[in-house]
Each structure stands twice: as C-alpha cells, then as structure tokens.
Amino acid sequence: MSDFLKRFENSCSNYPENIAITYNDLNFSYQQICQATDLLAQALVKMGFQKGNRIAIILPNYVQFPICVYAILKAGAVAFPINFMFSESQLRNLLQRTEIKGIITCETFLKKVEAAATDLALVAPLIVLGKNIKQSYISLTELFESTAPEEQPIEIANDDAAIILHSSAATGDPKAAEISHAALDINCNALKEQFNFNANDSFIVPLPLFHPLALVSILGTSFSFGSRIHLLPYFDPQKIVALIRQQRITAFFAIPSIYKALLETDIDSDSFDSVRVCLAAWQTCPDSLLRAFKNKFNRTIFQAYGLIEATALVTINRIDPEKNPESVGLPVANFSVRIVDEQNQELAIGEIGEIVLQGPGLMKDYVGNINETITGLRDEWLHTGDLGKFDDTGNLYFIDRRENIITRGGFHVFPEELEAHLANHPKIKEAAIIGFPDAIHGEEVKACIVPTANEMLTSEEVIEYCRQAFAVYKCPSIVEFYTSLPKSPTGKILKYHLKKNRAEKAPLP
C-alpha cells in the first residue's frame, strides 16, 4: 500500500468515530467512509478493472465523490475527476485521449456523458448515481448495498499513478497531468508541516472537487491526518460564512475570487475568528483585496503558487506575509524553483523570467500528449510557462502567464501588474487586460472593465489612472466596459473569450 493510502487508513483506524465529511447536515465518520471505500474498491475489482486503469468521475460535490476517489485508489486504478461543465466535444476528446476504462457519473450529466463515451472501450458499463438507472448501466448506490468486502490486497507502490488533474481549458482541449501516490503524499504532508494540521482541524470545500486545490490540498490533506471537511454542493457565500461560524472552521483554502465574493457579502467582521489559516492559490490576490480582508476580518491571507503539473502547491507565503503580501512565498514539498531566460540560463534576483521547477511532487506526464510532456519536462525540470521573479529573501513573485504577455513596440506588458493596479480603483469592480493586433506596434493594450455598481467611469479616467503608475507603453490605449467578465466554474477570467468578443458589453457611460 502506498504511503498516501496508509495515511488515510491510519486516520480511519486512529479516529474511527471522528467525522470525516459533513454534507447537508449529514455526518459521515471515518469508519463509515473507510467501509464505503472498501466496498466500492472491491466492486470495481470484481467488474474487471485492473491496476492502472483510468476511471473518470463526473459528479458534483456529493459525498459519493471523495468515496469514489479513494475507492479507485484502493482498487489500484487511477481516479480522474473531470469538470462536469466541459462541453460534450471537450469531454469526448479528453476521455478518448486519456484512454478511460470506466466512468462514474449521475443522472444530471448522463445524457452528455453517454454521447461523449460512445466510442470508448470501457471495462464495464457506466456507473450512475440516481434513482432511475437504465438496466444497461450499473447503479452506484446498489454497489454499496450488494458487494461484500473481501481481503484481496492490491500492491500499490508510491510511484504508481494515482490521479489525473486537468487544466481549466480556457482555450481548446484541457491538459491532463498524471500524478503519483508519492506526489500526493508529499504535497499533503508539506501542508501539514507548514500549518501543523491535525485531527482537530476542520476544512470547508468552497470549490468543485475536480479542482486541485479542493481535491488535493483540502480533501487529501484532511483525510491524511484525520481532519474534517464540510462539503458544499455549490458555492454560496452566505452558507460558507454560516458554516464557518457554526462549525468553528479552522482552515479556509480558496481562490481570490471567492475571498472577493465574501468581502462583497454583508457578513460580520468576527466571522473568521475560528479560522487560523486562510490560503489563496491558483491566481494572485490584488493588494487591495489582501488589505480589505485583513481590515475586515483581522486575518492574513497566505498566498500560494500552484499548478496541476506540480500536484497542487509549489510555494506558500508563510513566514511573514505582511512584509511582502504580494509574494507567493517560498518553496514547499522539496521543490527547487529557478527563474530562467529563453536560453534556460538562471537569472539574477529581481529579473523576470520563466518559472521552472524540480522535485518529487511533479507529474509523471501529460496523458495522451507525448509532445507536450517532452516540451514541459526537460532534464527533470518542469518548464511552467509562467513568468516570475525572486526578491533578495528568496520569495517568489508570480508575474503572469507567458501566453498573456503583450508585446507592444518591442516592450513587454504584464497584464497582471496592470490588473492589480486597476483593482485598487474605487470605481472598478473587475478588470482584465488583453492584447489585440496592431499594424504599427504589433500589439496594443486593451482594458476590459466592469464598473462598480452605480458608478460612472470613463475611458479617460481608466487610462489616466494607469499613467499615474506606469510608463505610457504599458497603459491601455482602449477601454471597453462590460456588465460582467466571462469566467470558468472556479472564477478564472477567460481572456480567450474576451479576445473573441464573447462577453456582454455594457453601454458606454
């Protein structure tokens, strides 16, 4: 058995009566979760699933979701939680490319999944959660009721594949990174060591469980040390705050847009009094958001840098985040981090270049994409495509994705830098910076703005606000106003849609 699964088994044996999951006011102990995962794992083996087979999970945040993940791992197979909001074509391409052998889903998504799985060589029929299941499919509920556990241990090594994490697919098909049991264990243990998590801690899950921050950093860490998770079926700021207050939540991990949504909700300033760790990852928080959260709730947000290829988190700003709040911190989980130029030469402190990583928490490969694997993994270093820099204390600063960089007249413009500045403007609710083709300069800078409600804002005001802080070449030459910006299910702004004009513009003021 892998070290990652051993930690889960230890939680089940050491804290059998502890609550592992709370869902819609229902409590499930570690003993119950352990028994359920054993039953489903045995059922999967009896169906013919073999070690290394990939099984997709296309479910909302139901309590069955984490049970399916750990049952698949116990069966020696590979769990692949997939974004249920993917289109049918995206889903079909992803399932085919990763050579999926089984699918667990529910009635809500069945029609789309059926169409996407038409040409797959599955080991068993679709496993479906619901009350009205076709006879040609397998009822997930009945598997828990009809399968008797048997002692047929499957040898699972630390280096064996455990899960697949996918990118958000803002453009085209998502990448799928295969992660080992060892990488999961390293990442979860690193979080435990950084913040001293134990069986007395309780987490809340404000994200879909297919998101790496939810799947690895919250669920994986909690289950590894006997902690408790409160599973939300969907994002609801009022419900989140109510649970934090009522259940005395101690750890809150989320993306910046969720922190922003909480600040915009009418909630009391003492709502986070029980929370000892607030962590933000996957995008960086504007300084205005960090300050506003600290002022209202008296809690510092620890910023982190993460990506699917590194299992979850790579760095955390954990030493003294108030001295350098915009930093994403120091490496965790035995990662080595470098900043290099286009010739792969390491750059000096303060210079901006590509972030490259090395360490045992890296992915095994991109499933079904050998060319991407060769490009991304070179000499055991992962080339992330992200731009960053170090300060003289060794803290990392995330600048932007290389693909987002705008080159205007030979000069680089970093959108995230401008976006962070615009976030401080009292009349701006949201901002995104994109490039658009220009015959003279190659690219020009466009600001896509959602004004604060009931505020009048002009293009000239936005441009002048940027010119007060930046060189002229960095400032937008055109401003467009929107009623909202297109986002992924996890709150990431989809700049690809803005570039293709797939967003509803607001009337000019």
Image: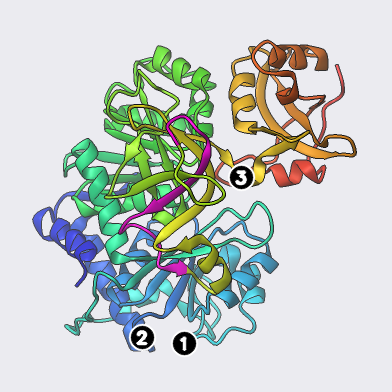
Specify start and end residues of the magenta stretch as a single range. Answer: 348-365
For the residues marked 2 and 1, what is the alpha-carbon distance in whole angstroms? 9 Å
Q: What is the three-letter code of the residue carrying label 3?
A: Arg
Q: Nearer the viewer, residue 494 or 506?
A: 494
Residue 212 x %, y %: 43, 52
Say how many tags the image has: 3
For image coordinates 25% across by 53% down, the residue present is 223
- Quadrant that contains the C terminus: top right
Residue 509 belongs to magenta span: no
**Which residue is labeled 1 in the image?**
123
Sooner in the amino-acid sequence: mark 2 or mark 3: 2
Give the quadrant of residue 242.
top left
287 w.r.t. 37: above or below: above
Structural crowding at the residue carrying mark 2, measured as other residues with C-alpha within 10 Å and reported as few (<14), some (14–19) or many (≥20): some
Q: Are circles 2 and 1 on residues that touch, CB within 8 Å?
A: yes
468 left or right of 137 in image: right
Q: Position of residue 297 (x, y in %)?
A: 38, 17
Q: To which residue does mark 3 refer?
A: 402
- Front-most of 342 and 212? 342
- Residue 236 image offset from top left, x and y in percent: 50, 36
Residue 51 visible, this angle: yes
Say which amino acid is labelled 2. Gln
Camera-side mark, 2 or 3: 3
Residue lying at 24% horizontally and 74% vertically, measured from the top left? 157
Q: How much space separates mark 2 and mark 3, taking CA atoms?
A: 40 Å
At 61% from the left and 45% from the top, the residue drawn is 402
Seen in the picture, residue 329 relative to 475 is either above or below; the reply is below
Q: Report the disc number at residue 50.
A: 2
Question: In the orientation shown, which residue stands out farthest toward the right?
Answer: 439
